[in-house]
Image: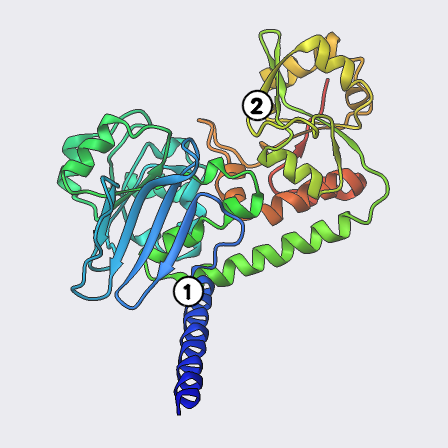
Amino acid sequence: MKNKWFLYFILIFLSSCTAKQEKESNKTKASGVKYAKGFTLENTEHYKKLRILNPWDDYKTYATYYVLKDSIKPKVIGNELTFYFKQTPKTIALHTAAQTASLKALNLEKYVKGITDPRFFYESKYSERLERKELIQTSNQVQINKERILLLQPDIVITSGWNNINSDYQLLIKMGIPPLFMIEWMETKPLGRAEWIKAIALLFDKEKEADSLFKLVETNYLAIKKKQSKNKSKPKILHGEEYNGVWYVAGGQSYIAQLYADAGAEYLWRDNEKSGSLALDIEVVLERSIDADFWFTTFGQNTADINYINQEKYSILKSVKENNIYSNTNRTRVMGGNDFWETGNLRPDFILKDIVNILYHKENSSDSLIFYKKLKLN
C-alpha cells in the first residue's frame, strides 16, 4: 500500500512539473521577443505587461506598462516607474519621428492628435494634418508645450527614451499622462530595432498585426543575409565623414556595421568592439581606407555636402576615384527628416537590399534603391 501511495504522489509531482513547464513555454511563446534587448512582453490571465529595459544600467527596468484585463492590479516592486491602462489608448501625442512607420503599419495614425514639430519628419501626412488643424503641436523638438499637452490630455505620449528622464516628462508623469519611452535606437541588431513595433502593439491590442509584419521583415532579411553569406568576395566599406579634422566612423558592434556584415561586406572597423561612433584622426582614416571599394556617408543632401566630399584630400581614395560614394539621403526633407530613420527603422530588410544592390549590382542599382543614392561628384 505504501508503495502504491508513493507511486501516486510521484505521478502527481511529475504531472505538475509538466504542466508548469507547458505553462512557462506558452508564456515564453506569447512574449515573442527574439532579437531586441531593450524590452520584454508578458501575457497573463489578468494583464499584459510591457517592460522597457535600461541599456545604460545593465538592462534593469526603465519603465513598466500594464494593460489590465480585469480589476486585479499587479503590485509594484520598489520604486519602479509603472503605468496602468484599463483600456486601449485612443489619443496619442507623437514626439518622435522614428515611430511613424510603426504607427502607419498598425493603422494607428488616426489616433495621433498631438505632434512634435513635423517639419523634422519625412512623413508629410502630419504636417498636412497640422495645417488642417486636425492635430496640435505639443512639442518643438526641445521641450513640451505644457499648456497644449494639458489641453489635449492624450492617453499616451510616444517619445524616445534617454539615459535620464528629463523634467518635462517627469512633469507629464506627475500629471497622470504616461510617456511610452522607445529606446529602439540603442539596439545594435537591425531586426532587434524593427521588433520594437511589438512594444507599441501590446498597448494597442495589435499584437497579431505586429507579429505578422515582423515575421515578413525577418524572413526577408534572413533570406538576403543567407544568400550574401555565400559570396566569396567581400567589398571593403568606408563609413562616415569628417567634421573639423575628426572622422566619425561607426563602431564594429554598431547597427550599421551589422548591416554591412549581413550584406556580405568587409567593414573596415568590423573588429572594433564599440557599438557607438569612433572619433578618429582624418589621416588615420584616409590611410586605412585608401583601397576601400565603397564609401557610405550621411552627407549628400545638398550642394554644400557634395562640395565638401569633392575636396582634393579625398581624391586619393579608391572609392572617390571610381565614383563609388553612396549616401542614405535619398528620401529626405528640407529640414532634415530622413526616411532611413523612419521606414528604415521598421524595414531593415529594405536597407539590407539597398546595400546589396550597391555592392553587387552597381550597374542596375540607381533606380532600385530606396534609402540610398549615388553621389555625383563634380
Q: Which residue of the protein is positioned furthest toward the right in this rendering?
A: 232
Q: Residues within 10 Å of mark 1 (few under 14, many from 20)?
A: some
Q: Position of residue 221 (x, y in %)?
A: 64, 52
State the quadrant of the C terminus.
top right
Q: Position of residue 38 (x, y in %)?
A: 44, 43
Residue denoted by label 1: 27
Q: CA distance from mark 1 to mark 2?
A: 37 Å
- Residue at position x 37%, y 61% from top? 206
In terms of secondary structure, where does tag 1 sit?
A: helix
Q: Is residue 302 visible?
A: no
Q: Residues within 10 Å of mark 2 (few under 14, many from 20)?
A: some
Q: How many marks?
A: 2
Front residue (pair 72, 119)? 72
State the quadrant of the N terminus.
bottom left
Task: Name the kind of residue labelled 2 in the image.
Answer: Ser
Front residue (pair 1, 176)? 1
Q: Which residue of the protein is positioned furthest toward the bottom in this rendering?
A: 1
In terms of secondary structure, where does tag 2 sit?
A: strand
Task: Name the kind of residue labelled 1 in the image.
Answer: Lys
Residue denoted by label 2: 277
Position of 365 relative to 40 (above/below): above
